[in-house]
Amino acid sequence: MKKITVYGKPQCPNCDKVKTWLSEHGIQFDYYDVTLDAAALNRIKVEGYQQLPVVSINDFEDSFSGFNPARLVRLTWEGN
């Protein structure tokens, strides 16, 4: 099973879209609010991201930012 982690912040429409999409498709994920978790914010910066949300698969083995339905669908194809 893949470990999915979403890094986001409150009042972020794309963050909400990603969380909703994952929930509606039965994909379990961890969520970190980068406005409250300095370590989470630092992690996405180290990975080179400047846009939220960031979706990490297996601790940044693969990752992407933004609401990207095509990438989200791939999570269901590849198993979670």
Image (cartoon, rainbow, N blue to C red):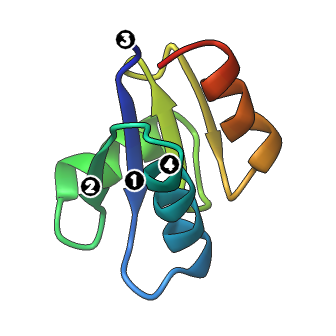
* Location of mark 4 (residue): 22
Of the two numbered discs 4 and 1 on the same chain, state the one appearing first in sequence.
1
Of the two numbered discs 3 and 2 on the same chain, state the one appearing first in sequence.
3
The residue type indicated by label 3 comes to Met
Question: Does the CB distance between marks 4 and 1 fall below 8 Å?
Answer: no
* Location of mark 3 (residue): 1
Mark 4 residue crowding within 10 angstroms, few (<14) / some (14–19) / many (20+): some
Of the two numbered discs 3 and 4 on the same chain, state the one appearing first in sequence.
3
Q: Classify 55 as above or below 67.
A: above
Report the label total. 4
Q: Position of residue 77 (x, y in %)?
A: 69, 18
Of the two numbered discs 2 and 4 on the same chain, state the one appearing first in sequence.
4
* Location of mark 2 (residue): 32
* Location of mark 1 (residue): 7
Question: Which residue is located at x 19 percent, y 47 percent?
Answer: 39
Which image quarter is the N terminus in? top left
Question: Which residue is located at x 43 percent, y 41 percent?
Answer: 26
29 left or right of 12 in image: left
**Is 70 in front, or is 33?**
70
